[in-house]
Amino acid sequence: MPIQKGEKIVVLEKNGASAEIYLYGATVSSWKSGGVERFWMSGAAVLDGSAPIRGGIPIGFPIFANDVHPEFAELGGAHGFARINVWTLDDVVLETEADIKATFRLVPNDAISKLFPHPFELVYEVTLTGSGLTTVLHIINPASTTSKPWQFNTVFHTYYKVPQSLKASISPLQGTPYIDRLDGMKRKVQESEKAFMLVETASAYDLSAKDEFEVLFSYGDDATDALKIVSKGFPDAVFWNPREVVGSTVPDMSKGGWNEFICWEPGVISNLATLKPGDRFTGVQHMEVVSM
């Protein structure tokens, strides 16, 4: 079956590939292509709806971190409330010979309205092909006589599964400016073509010079394939891994899990975006398996 709708999980299948999406947080927890799992999920991930899911693609909204959004403490904790609420699946699922697309929605409920007293709608599209996965997030400020502009951050906090995080890399990044979030928010410029995760890293790269930014995610020099990752509409992307010292203190990170993933997280991160009534923000993340 091309789609299976469970009480908690939606499964998409197309041309030998599959994707699993939890309704809780609309979190894509699995993407398999070429018989290989491409996303990392913590073996200690909480899957009962009592905490954010550690792994896959958690969606951050309307905040990224407390150093950016002034209302951080009131918006659902780290990365916001979108990843800790249940989304709805549209009844209509679009399918062609090449792909299948499911659409998820989140609108304010009583609990959200207490945190974020603004009208909004989040529309999340997940499209699967035999070799690729595309996630699109539409953030909407509905037009009405009572609507006002509001500010937000957002992020696709994507965890890529790797055999060994020390060998994986993102390229080409040479000359790309970034903010080192672990070194006093200093502004730096990437000197080498490839970025590796040799130490604890949380670098927010500035992608704003291009509306569409393409990188190659390499599993290592001996890998037979890689991932082409294209982001569109997002001005930033965070390259993150906590490494052993910090990773071992994260309660829902499995032992040694820090060495099994790398995060490349496109989003609106370093600055707040403003959405006026009737306006819409759209951010796209496309991932494609390519041969090496």
Image (tube, grey):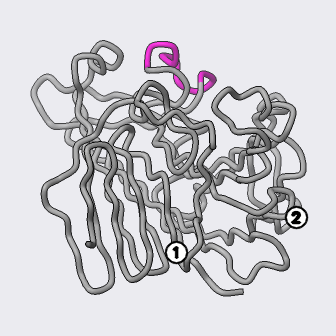
Q: Which mark is residue 192?
A: 2
Residue bearing the label numbered 1: 33
Q: Main secondary structure of the magenta part?
A: loop
The spot of residue 234 in percent (x, y) is 50, 53
Q: Which residues are magenta?
A: 66-75
Residue 191 occupies which quadrant of the picture? bottom right
Residue at left 28%, top 67%? 101
Q: Dot 2: what SS?
A: loop
Q: Using residue 10 as the reference point, say whether residue 94 is left or right of it.
A: left
Q: Dot 1: what SS?
A: strand
Question: Is 28 in front, or is 116?
Answer: 28
Amino acid type at image mark 2: Ser
The image shows residue 175, relative to residue 29, as above or below, that is below
First in sequence, mark 1 or 2: give its number.
1
Q: Which mark is residue 274?
A: none
Quadrant containing the C terminus is: bottom right
**Number of numbered callouts drawn:** 2
